Image (cartoon, rainbow, N blue to C red):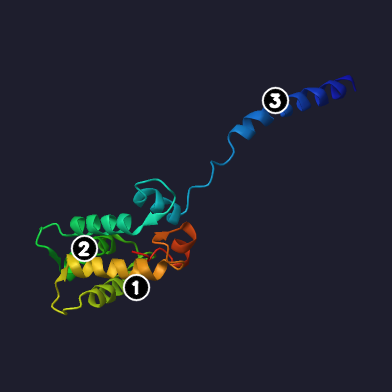
């Protein structure tokens, strides 16, 4: 009986000593959502919103990255390139989602290519970006807040 009396306090002390270690291995803080990350990337003046000028600069830089041949326009292949490469590497569970995304990307290209010539110019690309920014800027203050970005589901510029 004497060992039972000693075992309980020893176990309780060991458990109490391990609690701080368990608390230190708690889950990391949540990662900022995609809209917060987008603001962090685009908001160059760090005021917590995206201005029309910041969105325009970001869209222009995106066009330049996609225009690898520096022709001043994008073809459908340029526009879909990264998605097609991801589709080539995708497993069967991810493939249907990427195929749907590819269809949406093709439709977006055709909608932006106002001339219908298969060459999406920088001007067409930026005009579409500006129109989406204006539509997402619901309070018409020339800035996109986190709430406005979320309401536009990220398709704001």
Q: From the top left corner, tell me how far across and down residue 141 is, in percent.
A: 42, 62
Q: From the top left corner, tell me how far across and down residue 87 is, in percent.
A: 28, 64
Camera-nearest label, 2 or 3: 2
Q: Considering the numbered disc 2 on the image, is that residue within a helix, a strand or a loop?
A: helix
In the rendered image, the residue lying farthest to the front is 141
CA separation in Å, label 3 and label 1:
53 Å
Crowd band around label 3 with a 10 angstrom C-alpha radius: few (<14), some (14–19), many (20+): few
Residue at x 23%, y 67% (from the top left corner): 125
- Going from N to C along the chain, the mark reached first, 2 or 3, is 3
**Residue of label 2:** 81
**Residue of label 1:** 100
The quadrant in which residue 101 appears is bottom left
Looking at the figure, which quarter contains the N terminus? Answer: top right
Answer left or right for 3 relative to 68: right
Residue at x 40%, y 45% (from the top left corner): 46
The quadrant in which residue 137 appears is bottom left
The quadrant in which residue 100 appears is bottom left
Look at the numbered discs 2 and 3 and tell me whether their residues touch, using CB distance below 8 Å: no
Answer left or right for 42 relative to 139: left
| Label number found at residue 17 | 3
Q: Considering the numbered disc 1 on the image, is that residue within a helix, a strand or a loop?
A: helix
CA separation in Å, label 2 and label 3:
55 Å
Looking at the figure, which quarter contains the C terminus? Answer: bottom left
- Going from N to C along the chain, the mark reached first, 1 or 2, is 2
Q: From the top left corner, tell me how far across and down residue 76 is, in percent.
A: 18, 70
- Going from N to C along the chain, the mark reached first, 3 or 1, is 3
Q: From the top left corner, tell me how far across and down residue 104 is, in percent.
A: 32, 73
Residue at x 59%, y 38% (from the top left corner): 26
């Amino acid at each position: 009986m004497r060992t039972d009396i000693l075992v309980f306090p020893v176990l309780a002390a060991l458990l109490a000593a391990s609690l701080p270690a368990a608390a230190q291995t708690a889950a990391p803080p949540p990662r900022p959502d995609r809209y917060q990350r987008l603001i962090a990337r685009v908001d160059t003046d760090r005021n917590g919103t995206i201005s029309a000028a910041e969105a325009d600069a970001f869209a222009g830089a995106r066009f330049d990255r996609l225009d690898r041949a520096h022709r001043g326009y994008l073809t459908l292949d340029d526009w879909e390139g990264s998605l097609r490469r991801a589709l080539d590497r995708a497993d069967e569970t991810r493939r249907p989602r990427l195929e749907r995304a590819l269809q949406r990307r093709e439709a977006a290209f055709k909608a932006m290519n106002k001339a219908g010539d298969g060459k999406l110019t920088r001007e067409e690309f930026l005009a579409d970006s500006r129109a989406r920014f204006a539509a997402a800027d619901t309070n018409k203050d020339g800035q996109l807040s986190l709430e406005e970005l979320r309401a536009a589901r990220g398709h704001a510029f």
